[in-house]
Amino acid sequence: MIALEITMWDLTLMGIAYLYVVIIISIGELLRKKLNYSISFTRKLIHLFAGFSAYIIPFQDNPWSATIVAITFVILLYFSSPNSPIKVLSRWFETMADREDELSAGHIMGPVYYSISITVLVALFTFILPVEYSFTAAAGLTAMYLGDGLGTTIGLRYGKHKYRAPTGGTRSLEGSLAVFVGSFVGAMIAIVVFGIFGFSVVTINDAIVLSLIAAIVATIVEAISPSLYDNFTVPLITTLAVYISAMYLGIIV
C-alpha cells in the first residue's frame, strides 16, 4: 500500500491541475457568452481539454496526487444538479448538462463517466502497474478527449451520411472519421509525452503503430456504444487495446 505522503511539490501540481480545469471552464463560458453559442459549446470545450489535467502524472512524487484530483471531480460532478445548495455546482450543471444528463436523476452523468474513467485509469497505472506504462492509459484517455469530442462536434455540424449504430443510436461517417483523426492525434500526443519524453520506453515508429491501433479501436467503440456511456467505454477499451499491442511489440514485458 502506497502511503499518503503528499509533498509540497505534489500539492503544487494538484493546485495547477485544479486551476487548469477552472480556467478551461471559465474560457468556455466566456467565449460562449461573447459569441452567443449554446451551452454545448462549453461542454465540448471541457470535453476536449479538461482531461489534460491528468498529465501531471509524470511529474508527481506520490501517485495519490493525480488520483485525488480525479476523484474530486467525480464527486463534484455527481453532486452537481439544478437543486444543489452550492451555487457553483448548480452552475456546473447548467454549463455541462444536456438532455440525456437531465434524464439521469438530475445528475450530469456524461461528465461523471468522463471523470470516473480518468480516475480508474490514473489509479490503475499509478498504484498497480509500473508508471512507465502509463502512456497506454494516457493514449486511451486522450483518444476520448479529442476523438469523441471532435466526433460529436463534427458529426452534428457536418454529418450528412448517417448510419444506425447497433445500440440504436445514429452516427455519421463524417463524425466517425473525426473520431478516428482526433483519436490518432490524441494518442500520439499521449504516447510522445508519456512514452517518449516522459519515460523513454517507446520509439517514434512504435508510437505511430500504437496510435493507429488506438484510433481504430476508439472509432469502433464510439460507434457502437450508447452515447451516454462512451466516455467510459472508449478510454477503457482503447487503453486495453494499446496495452495488449504494446505487449505484442515487446514494449511492455
Image (cartoon, rainbow, N blue to C red):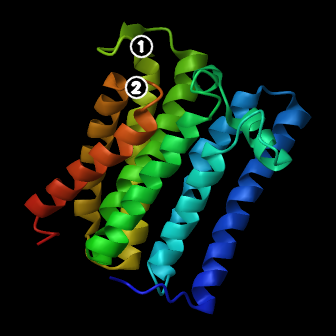
* Mark closer to the chain start, 1 or 2: 1
Locate residue 18 relative to residue 55 in the image: left or right.
Answer: right
Residue sitting at x 73%, y 66% = 19
* Quarter containing the N terminus: bottom left
Total of numbered circles in the picture?
2
- Amino acid at circle 1: Gly
* Quarter containing the C terminus: bottom left
Residue sitting at x 35%, y 38% = 233
- Amino acid at circle 2: Ser
Label 1, secondary structure: give it: loop
Q: Residues within 10 Å of mark 2 (few under 14, many from 20)?
A: many
| Residue 168 placement: quadrant | top left
Label 2, secondary structure: give it: helix
Q: How far apart are marks 1 and 2 (CA)?
A: 13 Å
Q: Position of residue 35 (x, y in %)?
A: 87, 32
Q: Where is residue 250 in the image (x, y as percent from the top left)?
A: 10, 68
Q: Where is residue 96 in the image (x, y as percent from the top left)?
A: 69, 36
* Closer to the eye: label 1 or 2: 1
Residue sitting at x 88%, y 35% = 33
Residue sitting at x 47%, y 73% = 57
The residue to which callout 1 is attached is 169
Residue at the far right: name it.
34
Locate residue 144 relative to residue 150 in the image: left or right.
Answer: left
Locate residue 84 relative to residue 50 in the image: left or right.
Answer: right
Q: Tell which of 229 and 189 is nearer to you.
A: 229
Is residue 13 visible in the rendered image? The answer is yes
**Label for residue 176?**
2
Q: Where is residue 244 in the image (x, y as percent from the top left)?
A: 15, 55
Q: In this view, does 94 lie above or below 65?
A: above
